[in-house]
Amino acid sequence: MKRLLLISFVIFALAVPLFAISGKVSYIEGQVMINYAVAELRQEVREGDFISTQKGKLEITLDDGTLVRVGPDSKIYMESLKEEKGRKKVSIKVTLGRFWTKVKRLVSKDEYNVSFRTGTAGVRGTVYRLDQYADDSAQLFVYDGKVEVRGEKPSGDADQMPAVPAEIDGPVEIEGPKEVSMEEWVKIVKQLNRIAISPEGVPTDPVEFDPEKDSQDPWVSWNLERDKASE
């Protein structure tokens, strides 16, 4: 009997899922959908959630204080929100539109990746925005820290969100991370630099941008104000 209980305990321990990181909607404006239902202030956001906006915008605050913001006419997928043995693994997929994040500084073993149609941006702790366009081109602007951007080949129908399962509270199997080959490019984008990626996935070299001119964009100025208020 004791042996049976021990075996059952081991099986249970191995079957226990990773500790889930979650977030909450900390700001909402206009029409925003989470899993194709109207989003609400203070609503919990979890791994596997699909977020789309019409003319609205949304801010999510993760457990560790990291801020995620989604602009108008945008679509993102919360691909991974996990923690195992003290190691955080956050992966967000931006399939269309405007995305801004202020990442709390992470420890060396943590991962925070934001993927887009033709690449992935990995950071340790920084502030940046990503604009993903419908033609597969994209731009990334870094406001603080630095970002490592890795190129990937465009995948067809990238602007389409995965279908929501009938039971969204249950586990959802998703495609694992794509291994980046040595032939694919890597760019380091530093503070107050930007990079543009063509529809074919070809990057420019990082170049400086004018922060004063950039702040005239209403989306940028709103995010800068929100970041300052969060300090």
Image: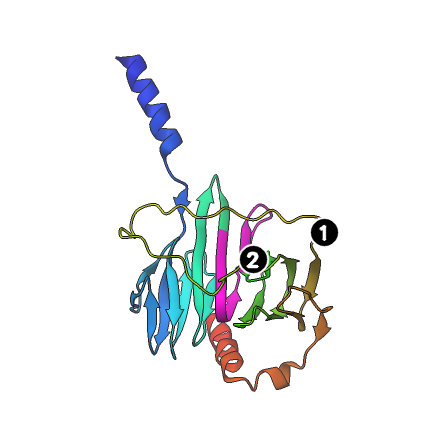
Magenta region: 90-115
Which SS class for mark 2?
loop
Q: Residues within 10 Å of mark 2 (few under 14, many from 20)?
A: some
Spatial separation of the CA atoms under disc 1 and disc 2? 30 Å
Q: Is residue 231 visible?
A: no
Hey, which quadrant is residue 115 in on the image?
bottom right
Relative to 160, is 182 on the left or the right? right
Does residue 94 lie above or below 4 as drawn?
below
The x, y position of residue 26, in whole percent, is 37, 68
Q: Residues within 10 Å of mark 1 (few under 14, many from 20)?
A: few
Q: Residue at x 55, y 56 (%)?
A: 113
Q: Residue at x 28, y 14 (%)?
A: 2
Q: Residue pushed farthest front?
A: 156
Does residue 19 lie above or below 197 as drawn?
above
Q: Is residue 16 visible?
A: yes
The residue indicated by pointer 1 is 183
Q: Which SS does the magenta portion mostly show? A: strand
The residue indicated by pointer 2 is 105
Q: Is residue 167 magenta?
A: no
